[in-house]
Image (cartoon, rainbow, N blue to C red):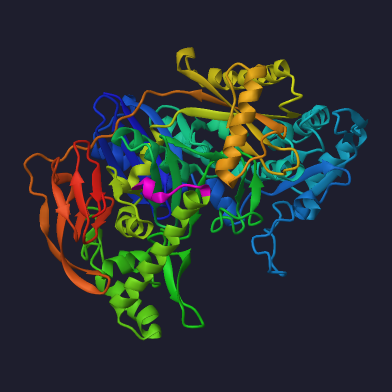
Amino acid sequence: MAWRIGVDIGGTFTDVALVDDATGEIGVAKAPTTPQDFAAGVLSALAQAMERYGVQAANVGLLAHATTVVTNALLEEKGARAAVIMTRGFRDVLELRRSARPDLYDLFQDAPAVLAPRRRRFEITERIGADAEIVIPLAEDEIDGLIEALKADKVEAVAVSLLFSFLNPAHEQRLGERLRAGLPGIPIYLSCEVLPEIKEFERASTTAVCAYVGPILASYLDRLVQATDALGLPPMYVMGSNGGVFEAAEGVAMPAMAVESGPAAGVVAAALAAAQCGRPDLLSFDMGGTTAKASLIQNGKYETTPEYEVGGGASANRWMNGTGHPIRVPVIDLAEVSAGGGSIAWVDAAGGLRVGPGSAGAEPGPVCYGRGGTEPTVTDCNLLLGYLDRSSLLAGEMEIDFDAAEAAITEKLAKPLGIDARAAAAAVIDIVNHAMAEALKIVSVERGHDPRDFTLAAFGGAGPLHAGALAEELGMAEVICPPIPGAFSALGLVGSDLQRDYVRTVYVTTDTADAAAMEAAFAELEAEGAAMLDRAGTPPERRAFQRTMDARYERQSYELSVPAASSFDADALATAAEAFHDRHRQTYGHDNRGEPVQIVSLRVSAIGKIPALAIRQEPQVGAEPVKGNRAVLFKGETLQAEILDRVKMPKGRTAKGPAVIESLESTILVPPGWQAEMDSDGYIRITGASA
C-alpha cells in the first residue's frame, strides 16, 4: 500500500490529507497551527495523521507541503537583514517604484516599506547598454570594499540587480562570483539567475524579495527536511505559487516561487474536483481561518498571472497595483480578502459594524475556542446563529464555549449597535458574505465571465458554511462540496505535478521576428528545465514542457500571455499573433488587428507529471446519518434544521434545506430552498430552485 501525504499550514489549523494510491480513499487530521514555530505544528499534525490511519513511513510515496513562511515574513516585515547592490546611479530604484497607486485621490498614502533600507543599498560602477554591449566595464577594484561594507553591516543575504543584466549577465555573474567567495555562507541572489527579464523595477523587486525571505525559508525547510528524513519519509516537495510542486533545494534558490503556496494548493485541488465531477467550469472558493480565496477554473484549467504584488497592503488588495512588492513569477490568478472564520468583528468610532482585516488566528483564536480570545469573530457568530454545534467541533475533540461567544458578541457588538446578539451575529455574516462575493466577482465578472455559468466549489474549514449564501447572491445554481473540505487544500498538494517556470526576454514583433532564433531560445529554456527534472530524478516518459509568450501591442506597457507552438516557425508566429488579438478582445473588449504584436518574453514550464489522482470518501455502510434537529436563524426567521453526519450519508441521500451537514473538519450549511445530495465518491452537490 502506497500513500500520498499533503500538509498545509492554515491561519488556525495545520491540515494533513492522506490518499491511498490504490483505492483513492482519503484521511484527514488537523492540529492547531503554531505561529511561534510552524515546523512544530507540521510535525505534530503529521504524526497524528500517520498514527490515526496506521501509515508507516516506508509506505509513503509522496510528501508535499504548503508553507506560509514566505508570505508571513513579508506581511509581518520580519525578513532577513538583506542588502541590495545596483548599478551606480540606480541605488533608489526600489524606493522610486512605479507611479501606480491603490488610491488615486489619497495624496498622503505611503508605499510599502522598502525591504532594504538605503544604508543597505549599495552601488557599483559598471554599465551594460540596451544593446547588450558593455558601456562601462565592471569596477573590480570596488568589490573588496563592497564586501567589507557588507560584512560590517552583518547582512544575511545579498540581492544583485544591475542594469540590462537580462541581456548580458557578464557583470552580474562576475560580481556574484566575487561576493560568493568573499561572503561564504551568505546567500547571493543574482537577477540574471532569478529573473532574466525586462522591467528594471520588477526585476530588482523580485530579487530583493528572494534575499529578504530566502534565509528564513532555507532555515525552516532545513529543519523540516531533517525531521522528515529522520522519520524515514521520502524527500519533501514544496507547493509553488504556479500550481506545481518543487524540491526544497529549488525553493531555497528561488524563494519567491513559494509566495502563494497554500492558496495555490487549494486551486489545484479544485481543478482535480472539476475533472472528477464533470464540472470543467468552476469558481473555486476557499475560506479558512484568516482569509478567503477565489479563483476561476475554465475548461478544467486555472489561469496564472506573471506579475503579482506581495506584502504591504497587497494581502487585502490583490487586484490593485501599488499596494505591495512586485514579483515577476507565475502565480495562480486569485483574489484574496481578509475574511475567515477568525476575522474579528468590531464597531468603529462612527458606530458602523466592521469585519476584519484583523484576525484572531490560531492564537488565541475565536472566543468560543476557549483559548483566551476576547474579540468576537465570524466563527463565534456562526455558532450563535445555530450553524455550528454549540458543544464541540472536530468530531468532539474540541470543546466549544457557547456562553463566552454569546457574551462577547453581546458586549462588543450588540450593545454598541442597540440590537440583540443574534441580530448582530447575522449582520456580521451578511458583511463577510458580501466581501467574499466581491472576491468571486473579481475573478469572474471582472475577467469577462458570468458566474451563473459556473459551479461553485466550496472548501476550507469555513467555506461550505457560507457557500449557499454566496451562490444565491451571485445567481449560481449549484455548489459542490468535496470530501474533507476543511483540509481540501492539502489534497491539492498530492495531486500537483512537479513544475518550475523559466523566462527570457526577446523583445521582437511578430512581423520581424526570426522564428529560428525564437525556437533556439525556447530550446535553451527547455534545457534548463530538463536539468531541473534530471536533479529530481523524473523519468523521460513523465516529462512535459509548456511554452507561452508574453505579448502586447507596441505602445502598451502591459502584456497578456498566449500559448506558443511546440515547434516554432513562421506559421507559429502568425498563430501566436491571432491568439493575442483574441485574448486582448476577451480581456479588454477590443483588439487592434492589423497592428504588429510585440513579443516581450518567452516562458517555458518544465513539468514532471505524477499519476492522476482520484479522491474518494465512502460513507459508513448502514449507519444512520441523522443526528437530530437544531434551531437556526435565516434572514431573521428561526427555523428547525435537520443535522446530519456527513460520513454516514450514503450515495443518493438528500437533505432539504434548512439543513446542517457536519464532519470532522468542516460544516456544510444548506439554506432554505436548496437541496444537498451525496454522490458515490463523497462529493455533496447542493442545488437551488433554479438548477
Q: Is residue 639 above or below residue 89?
A: below
Up/down of 122 relative to 277, above or below: below
88 left or right of 293 in image: right
Whole-percent x and y of residue 532?
Answer: 57, 22
Residue 106 in sight here? yes
On the picture, is 526 further left or further right than 447?
A: right
How many marks the image carries: the answer is: 0
In the rendered image, the residue lying farthest to the top is: 540
Q: Is residue 665 left or right of residue 205?
A: left
From this viewpoint, is residue 370 visible?
no
Q: Residue at x 78, y 34 (%)?
A: 179
On screen, residue 232 above or below 102: above
Q: Position of residue 274 (x, y in %)?
A: 35, 37
Q: Is 450 a magenta residue?
A: yes
Percent coordinates x, y for residue 323 in the rendering = 63, 57
> Quarter of the image holding residue 497?
top left
Above or below for 602 versus 412: above
Nearer the observer, 183 or 116: 116
Q: Quadrant of the N terminus?
A: top left
Foreground residue, 205 or 274? 274
The residue that appears at 62% across and 20% down in the rendered structure is 572
Q: Would residue 655 be counted in the magenta stretch?
A: no
Residue 592 spot, x, y in % from top left: 67, 39
- Which residue corresponds to the image point at 91% horizontal and 34% vertical from the top-left? 139
Give the quarter of the image for residue 683: top left
Residue at 38% over, 57% down: 474
Q: Which residues are magenta?
A: 447-457
Q: Tell which of 73 and 658 is nearer to you.
A: 658
Q: Is residue 466 left or right of residue 183?
A: left
